[in-house]
Amino acid sequence: MKIAVLLPYKENFSVNYAGAVSLFVKDTIIHSRFKKSTFVFGNMDYKKPFLKNYINVQLNKNILQSKSKNYIKNFIQHEKKINCDIIEIHNRPNYIKYLNHLINKKIILYFHNDPLSMNGSSSLKDRLYLLNNIDKILFNSKWSQKRFFLDIENDELLKQKTSVCYQSTSKVNVNFKNKRKIISFVGKLNTAKGYDLFGKAILKILDKYPDWKSVVIGDEPREKIVFNHKNLTVKGYTKHNYVLNLLKKISISVICSRWEEPFGRTSLEAASRGSAVIISGRGGLPETSRSAIILKKLSSHEIFLEIEKLILDKKKLLNLQLKNYRNFVFNHRYISSLLHIETFYHLDKQIFEQVIIK
């Protein structure tokens, strides 16, 4: 069974500035029984991809052809040499129209973003086209799935053609004695992610509780929001493994996005490392943790109050940390297996039982 995974054009499938799409693809493949027969196709400038089975698709110099069409045309030429059974497209519904002529291929589309915000799925016509021309559509949250079915009242299609397959992270041992009085913010340092709200709240916290510190990981060259405090450390963009190790020491993590997060990987990772998580109720964020504190009002004052409550109530803080850690189930191996089941579901029953059940 051969699988072709097609990444968005210019997706960095490398440790250098890897985004949520690349991390998800890398982690699920590493833990897959089909690791050796899965090939990742993409286009990036970095020379060291996450996996050996990565094929960089170069574009032809054709100013009259769209980059998407050019990219897909060259992908098809590469894929023909391998002849995969399944083509798994990530986060680019507009690619489907260039692939619908392929014969004897199962087409899977995985949404990482809000379908209504994307080229190729924003209109009702687009989404009906996808439902009629794809074998399976996967979403990273129930919220994203619900968005896709806006104005489409068909429970049978929802059940037959679509499924939710959450993002994942690793399951590790956490020593709660090593937790420090640190509050984290991980993500783009912009207003969409609510960094301006977090910054105002954290300065008040650090002034009022000088034994506490804060660590911020992320950058945003297009939007300059700067906060300074002797107990505030802004690390900029940092490699993913460093972030995961740091989270094991973090006591409280804040994810206060204004925009509708399709899922919220940073919240999932913080919860998996035993942090008490404070989130906005936007998009799919509430699906990342059963024990997250959901902000009643998205404001710097509300963020301040929720952080302060945890600082003053050590028992509640530890209880939330333990709940998040113990209730975490979205590990790489589990999600990789779930992805395979959803991917192979539309194959012949005999083949399905052969590759999955055995």
Image: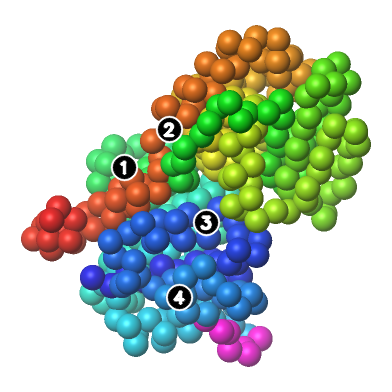
Type of the residue with mark 4: Lys
Is residue 130 among what the camera can see? Answer: no
Q: Residue at x 58, y 26 (%)?
A: 177
Work out how far the residue at label 3 is from the one at label 1, CA to CA, in angstroms.
Answer: 27 Å
Is residue 158 among what the camera can see? Answer: yes
Work out how far the residue at label 1 is from the one at label 4, CA to CA, in angstroms.
Answer: 36 Å
Dot 4 surroundings within 10 Å: few (below 14), some, or many (20 or more)? Answer: few
Q: Is residue 307 above or below residue 157?
A: above
Dot 1 surroundings within 10 Å: few (below 14), some, or many (20 or more)? Answer: some
Q: How is the image coloured?
A: rainbow
Seen in the image, is 242 located left or right of residue 204?
left
Kindly identify which residue carries mark 4: 52
Kindly identify which residue carries mark 2: 328
Q: Is residue 115 magenta?
A: no
Work out how far the residue at label 2 is from the one at label 3, CA to CA, in angstroms.
Answer: 18 Å
Q: Which numbered mark, 2 or 3, is in the foreground of this view?
A: 2
Q: Position of residue 43 (x, y in %)?
A: 57, 75
